[in-house]
Image (spheres, coloured by chain):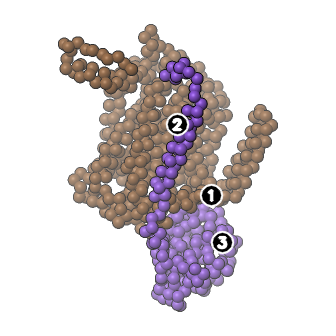
Chain colours: A brown, B purple
Amino acid sequence: MATFHEISPNASAGAKTLNWIDNRFPLSKLFKEHMSEYYAPKNFNLWYIFGSLSLLVLVIQIVTGIFLVMHYKPDAALAFGSVEYIMRDVPWGWLIRYMHSTGASAFFVVVYLHMFRGLMYGSYRKPRELIWLFGCGIFLALMAEAFMGYLLPWGQMSYWGAQVIVNLFSAIPLIGPDLALLIRGDFVVGDATLNRFFSFHVIAVPLVLLGLVVAHIIALHEVGSNNPDGIEIKATKDANGIPLDGIPFHPYYSVHDVFAVSMFLFVFSAIVFFAPEMGGYFLEYNNFIPADPFQTPLHIAPVWYFTPYYTLLRAVTTEMMYVLIACVLVGAVLAVAKIKMPSLFKGAIVGGALVVAAMMMAIDAKFWGVVAMGGGVVILFFLPWLDNSPVKSIRYRPSWHKVLYGAFVINFFVIGYLGTQPVSVIAGRISQFGTLFYFGFFILMPWWSRLGTFKQVPSRVNYTAH
Amino acid sequence: MSETLAASGPNDPSKRTWLIASGCAGAVGGIAAAVPFVSSFQPSERAKAAGAAVEADISAIKPGEKMTVEWRGKPVWIVRRTPEQLAALPKLNDQLADPLSQRKPTEQAPEYARKDESRSIKPEYLVVVGICTHLGCSPSEKFKAGPQPSLPDDWQGGFFCPCHGSTFDLAGRVFKNKPAPDNLEVPPHMYLSDTKLLIGEDKKA
């Protein structure tokens, strides 16, 4: 507990007020810890603006969301009409709604870039594992938030998208059908589903999201930010214990981020005013038709930010299962042959692989498609323990690592694109290849991340004043 | 604080026992309090009551056409098949995943719809729930035979699910190597007269 601090009676009114507050609430202390005396590396590049930007988009979503709830009706008979009412009759309602719908896509744009930044510079490596885990939790909560929010306009894509995703849960053996029933609250997606998704979308998930964001930032400020060189700046401090390569977040990065915010808002406003539907990618055309439980639209695709994972789901067919079973068995054989370990572990690996292979034969490919889709997200949580590279940053890794990361990005775009397209034989084969590459990249990372000639990491960050 | 406690005297183990016991009692109360909240996720009485059987007048369906009725919020299709379409069904058996509805027989179809390839009481009329067994989309009708986009060249007529490309024949049977694991569900149904069909109930019930 801090001692009570008296201030000179001649001090200004502002100083007296601040002192009064500081004796009762750690206002100055919090400001120092998180802003004016939070030392961030001085060599941040463009990639480091996406954290602040995602916070900005979160605020946009919460504010616009609050205003939309004032006019929206969570009722299967009224929902579609109330969204059109917001668009046509509520003063400036169209702007608030388009800000919210564009904000959803913008959120995923900045979060995907933010995550890729972490991947490039090894921001999830020790001691930042928990920052990464909280971040993956945010990503998951964001996906839930986006999915449930998409049902609310009660258009054709809302309805059938929800129908497909809720039915994913019914693919789980034994508990699946009952679980899907509990989620829908009816035998089909209907009024009950709409009402509960509304509740989750406007209060339950946002609360979780905010809690995770706070945890993410507290963990970050505890260990300090990583940087493009992947060097711990706290290792080199001056006489006052301040990192030599660190600068206070405020004013240096707060001003820097205000500039980034204005740049972002240029682009954001351009989309809101001139292309809010983004050619059917941000708002799908079929969603301007009211939900019809008897008529599935001829082509169903999720919104763009889910499509890479949707491709993982679609790639798992009965034929693909044979390939995956082969992968499991080959993996087990290699593990037994190549890794030194007690014979008990080897037995367990062989036994486990056989059990998994047997389950893969016994349970529908549909269930394994769901596993692939979920696994594609869950595997991100394990990244801190999959990456065994001796250096953090891509800058000091072998050149072929950069090529591999490039291939990962291209593959992510390809499976993302295929997720928006109707099924065809060739697209199916490419998405199966893309699925194997996606998982191979992560699962084989413990081995490939160690291979090659790594460059010497300098003791101080690379920075030229400008 | 714990140091002062430890210094003041030895721990009293009976206090710890009671702490654990009351903690457990609290946890039981907490779980019990969660039951009503989780149960509220279940379908309401109103939703359950909406599952009653529905009647359909099938006199107006022409051969090769389909009508749709709503049962439990789901589309139920009634298709009047032509003799040629019926004759083609047994020939498809090799290409189907489960031509005789033997996988999960009780869930897929009542017994009277499992006796042959037509999966029906009267072979002329097919009655199926129009919901794909993969992820619940409603397949679209592709009754015209012959090559067309997204379908094989030897297509004999049937249904195509736009979501993930599963195909079904005119008895609602799923083709091999498609995402859908099972044939389309045949709901319990019975004929009240030659032209009146009751969907949702059969003689057994």
The local crowd at label 2, few if under 14, some if 14 to 19, many if 20 or more residues have their Cα within 10 Å, is some
- Which part of the image, by quadrant, shows the C terminus of chain A? top left
Label 1 resides on the chain identified as A
* Label drawn at residue B105: 3
Judging depth in this view, the residue of B130 and A131 nearest the camera is: A131
Q: Report the residue marked by disc 1.
A: A173
- B119 vs B70, left or right, is right
Q: Secondary structure at mark 1?
A: loop
Q: Is residue B200 visible?
A: yes
The local crowd at label 3, few if under 14, some if 14 to 19, many if 20 or more residues have their Cα within 10 Å, is some
Name which residue lies at 25% across and 14% down: A7
Task: Name, please, the residue furthest toward the top.
Answer: A239
Residue B33 in picture, x, y percent from top left: 48, 51
Q: Are marks 1 and 2 in contact (CB under 8 Å)?
A: no
Q: Earlier in the sequence, mark 1 or mark 2?
A: 2
Label 3 resides on the chain identified as B
Q: Report the residue marked by disc 2.
A: A133
Name which residue lies at 52% across and 72% down: B130
Examine the rendered structure and indicate whether residue B56 appears above or below residue A140. Answer: below
